[in-house]
Image (cartoon, rainbow, N blue to C red):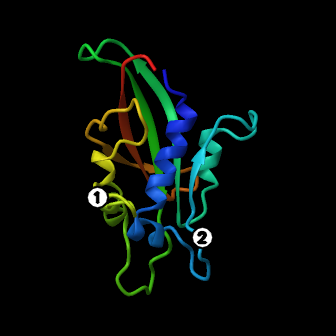
Amino acid sequence: MLNPAAITDALATQLALIPALAAAMTPAGSVVARIDAFHYRLGAENTLQMAVYKMPAPSLLVAWEGTLGGNFNGATIWKHRMGVYFRMGNMAGVLGPVGYEDLWYQTVNGVPTGSSRNIRYLNLMTGLDIMDTPSVSHAVDEDRIDYFRGEFLYPEIGDN
């Protein structure tokens, strides 16, 4: 099995290379997009739920959320589930605002710099197949602030 941490990093890296998405995740006055990978390494005080709650606007966070095992098609043994969390920036008074619908469209259709394929048809790393069809859903945090969570499922070919 591939290390899910490497898949998480590879997905965050490729999402950061989508120009329109990176621009939408870059706060005013900055040149750095807030597109990060979350890893379960920092102790119980830094849970995924807390990391999502503390996400500044705008930002995007990629997290591994589990691996499904099984013999799905005779070649695929694992399916890695990745959560992609979005917080959009404040769009009040902005010309051409970027909403959650736009962010999801950019995420699944945007082409990373240096690639000829969008993220849905891009092999992130050797051993992974093209992802299953991604999904997105609405969520509300503890402060009643909207955010969205996308789900990407990456089939792994063989037992790497």
Amino acid on which disc 2 is placed = Val
94 shown above or below 2: below
Do we see residue 61 in this rendering?
yes
- Kindly report the distance in space between the C-alpha atoms of the residues bearing marks 1 and 2: 24 Å
**Nearer-the-camera pick, 52 or 72:** 72
Q: Where is residue 154 drawn, in percent x and y?
A: 37, 33
User: Measured from the top left, where is residue 49 in percent x and y?
Assistant: 60, 41
Report x, y in % for residue 1: 48, 20
Q: Secondary structure at mark 1?
A: loop
Q: Give the residue displayed 46% in from the left and 46% down from the top.
A: 11
The kind of secondary structure element at disc 2 is loop
Q: Count of labels shown? A: 2
- Is disc 2 surrounded by few (<14), some (14 to 19) or many (20+) residues within 10 Å? few
User: Is 103 left or right of 60, judged from the image as shown?
Assistant: left
Q: Is residue 140 visible?
A: no
Residue picked out by circle 1:
116
103 left or right of 65? left
- Vertical relation: 18 (above or below) 12: below
Q: Residue at x 41, y 42 (%)?
A: 124
Assess whether mark 2 and mark 1 are in contact (beta carbons under 8 angstroms).
Answer: no
**151 over 65 or under it: above or below:** below
Q: Nearer the viewer, residue 42 or 100?
A: 42
Residue drawn at 47 percent across, 66 percent down = 88
- Please state which of residues 9 and 97 is positioned toward the viewer in this rendering: 9
Residue wearing tag 2: 32
> Which amino acid, mark 1?
Ser
> First in sequence: mark 1 or mark 2?
2
Residue 13 vs residue 127: left or right? right
Label 1 vs label 2, nearer the camera: 1
